[in-house]
């Protein structure tokens, strides 16, 4: 498709669109609820569901003809009419037929609230008939097709999105489409194959009728009952855009949010579980000193008292927000300290999981905590400082230093302080441990691998009032250290204001009216 603009007429209104653009994409901009269940902009088009019929003609004197809007493209002078009576009649009959073959169990379906049939059966003004008499099909069982995805054959409407996703995105023919008797079409696994992919849950998102179900979503609240908050995945430096679905201060699921510059409409399955503490991960909930509870003011005072008497060795990584890193830099500027960074690398998948396992390492560079990207992913330099008796105080920020080469025997004579979200080995061994909010519990920004600044929003509140964002904790520590509140950064708007004034790369960024797709920073 070229960048040339052409004139078309949509429902009597003259508009300019890209030459060769799919008609369904044009129509959706003006009619978001236009039925096109088989079409997806990132997948090959097929036109087999036949529910996107419209009337179209090339010249004013020509009669309208019924065409598929998902396969037809815009040409100069084309006229499109979504209300063309034969096209509307065909759409309604096809939706009615699809509904008749669909089980009437909306009250307990996992797709309720985001189902194609629910949406369009109402909007297309179908005849008032009851589907309850249809009931469920006999002898149909749930089929586990792999990677936590279950197939309910009786709900398949034959959109084939799942088949095309496996072929177009995963690059493997895993699922095939079978034509059944009496219109009961279905999908099947190819012989000897199962669905094995870290992107399998995208099939559940793509499914238009609830035929593909996630094991993790069964018996969860429906989409109708869940609030939706924009966020960013912290799994890697890709910065996948997400929605956090939550209710009553609890996150239930994470789904992809479209951003053509970053992740398109997809996300890895592993990123969908970021809100869960389990499999050895436990949340740090209380401020403690040697295992006993401690007020926040006393905990900060104890850390600062140690910092006054000895050099403070600080361990951090790119898993903090840019706001955390900016205020931490202010703290490090006034405290005698040495910084040790963990880049946390691993083998990416070449798609939406990068080699950098942190969401914001570029933020460390922008905040002048890291000098460049070539950081050694270990703590050997800190180990040398411990062995030489130079290091006596360590502040670990959301990092488990015991998982990176240091041992308990080595650190017997070292006072460890910990600020973070997890109750890991470092938190348990720390003289003082201070819990911090997760990125679901405050608003902030990450800079992804392409230097795109992206904003995430608070979806839920922390479990208790003692848990604060790290940038707020660092600000309190700075104020306590200098004995003044003249540079108070305990409010996020003040942090953003100071960031814009201090960092030239953010001079034109409006954090209060932020572009959902992000802002590319001109850093280099």
Image (cartoon, rainbow, N blue to C red):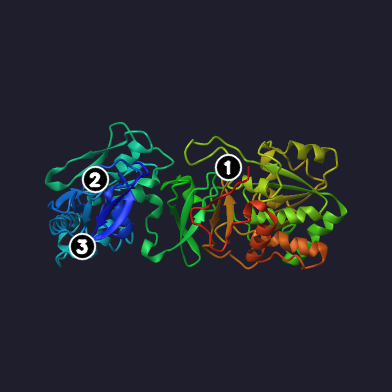
Q: Observer-nearest residue: 326 or 144?
A: 326
Q: Which residue is mark 1?
A: 357
Q: Which type of secondary structure does the marked residue at label 1 adopt?
A: loop
Q: Is residue 289 above or below residue 450?
A: below
The mark lying in front, picked from 3 and 1, is 3
Q: Secondary structure at mark 3?
A: loop
Residue under the image location 82 percent in, 44 percent down: 391
* Image quarter (top left, top right, bottom left or bottom right) of the N terminus: top left
Q: Give me the C-alpha separation between circle 3 and circle 2.
A: 22 Å
Q: What residue does disc 2 label?
A: 72
Q: Percent x, y for residue 169?
A: 38, 38
Relative depth, front residue between 521 and 287? 521
Tag nearer the camera, 3 or 2: 2
Asked if disc 2 and disc 1 are in contact, CB closer than 8 Å, the reply is no
Mark 1, other Cα within 10 Å: few <14 / some 14–19 / many ≥20:
many
* Mark 3 vs mark 1, CA separation in Å: 47 Å
- Relative to residue 115, is residue 418 drawn left or right? right
User: Is the C-beta separation of discs 3 and 2 under 8 Å?
Assistant: no
């Amino acid at each position: 498709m070229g960048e040339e603009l052409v004139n078309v007429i949509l429902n009597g209104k003259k508009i300019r669109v890209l030459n060769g653009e799919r008609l369904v994409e044009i129509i959706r901009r003006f009619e978001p609820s236009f039925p096109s269940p088989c079409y997806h902009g990132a997948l090959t088009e097929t036109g087999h569901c036949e529910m996107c019929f419209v009337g179209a003609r090339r010249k004013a004197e020509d009669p309208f003809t019924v065409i598929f809007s998902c396969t037809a493209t815009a040409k100069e002078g084309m006229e499109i009419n979504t209300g063309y009576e034969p096209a509307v009649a065909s759409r309604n009959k096809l939706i009615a037929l699809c509904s008749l073959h669909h089980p009437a169990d909306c009250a307990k379906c996992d797709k309720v609230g985001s189902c194609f049939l629910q949406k369009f059966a109402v909007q297309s003004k179908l005849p008032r008939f009851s589907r309850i008499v249809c009931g469920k099909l006999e002898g149909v069982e749930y089929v586990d097709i792999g990677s936590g995805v279950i197939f309910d054959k009786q709900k398949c409407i034959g959109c084939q999105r799942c088949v095309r996703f496996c072929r177009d995105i995963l690059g493997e023919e895993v699922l095939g489409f079978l034509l059944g008797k009496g219109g009961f079409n279905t999908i099947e696994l190819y012989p000897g194959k199962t669905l094995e992919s870290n992107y399998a849950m995208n099939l559940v998102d793509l499914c238009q009728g609830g035929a593909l179900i996630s094991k993790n979503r069964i018996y969860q609240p429906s989409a109708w009952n869940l609030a939706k908050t924009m966020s960013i995945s912290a799994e890697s430096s890709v910065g996948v855009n997400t929605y956090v679905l939550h209710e009553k201060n609890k996150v239930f699921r994470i789904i992809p949010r479209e951003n053509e510059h970053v992740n398109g409409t997809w996300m890895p399955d592993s990123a969908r579980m970021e809100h869960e503490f389990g499999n050895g991960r436990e949340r740090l909930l209380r401020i403690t000193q040697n295992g006993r509870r401690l007020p926040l003011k006393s905990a900060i005072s104890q850390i600062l008292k140690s910092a006054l008497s000895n050099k403070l060795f600080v361990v951090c990584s790119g898993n903090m927000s840019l706001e955390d890193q900016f205020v931490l830099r202010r703290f490090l500027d006034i405290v005698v300290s040495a910084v040790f960074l963990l880049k946390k690398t691993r083998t990416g998948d070449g798609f939406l999981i990068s080699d950098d396992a942190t969401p914001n390492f570029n933020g460390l560079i922008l905040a002048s905590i890291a000098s460049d990207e070539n950081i050694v992913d270990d703590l050997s330099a800190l180990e040398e400082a411990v062995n030489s008796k130079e290091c006596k105080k360590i502040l670990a920020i959301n990092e488990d230093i015991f998982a990176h080469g240091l041992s308990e025997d080595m650190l017997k004579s070292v006072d460890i302080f910990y600020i973070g979200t997890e109750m890991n080995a470092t938190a348990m061994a720390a003289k003082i441990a201070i819990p911090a909010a997760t990125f679901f519990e405050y608003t902030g920004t990450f800079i992804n691998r392409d230097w795109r600044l992206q904003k995430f929003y608070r979806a839920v509140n922390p479990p208790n009032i003692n848990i604060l964002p790290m940038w707020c904790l660092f600000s309190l520590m700075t104020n306590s250290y200098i004995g003044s509140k003249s540079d108070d950064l305990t409010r996020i708007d003040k942090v953003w204001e100071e960031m814009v004034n201090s960092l030239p790369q953010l001079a034109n960024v409006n954090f209060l009216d932020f572009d959902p797709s992000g802002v590319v920073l001109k850093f280099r």
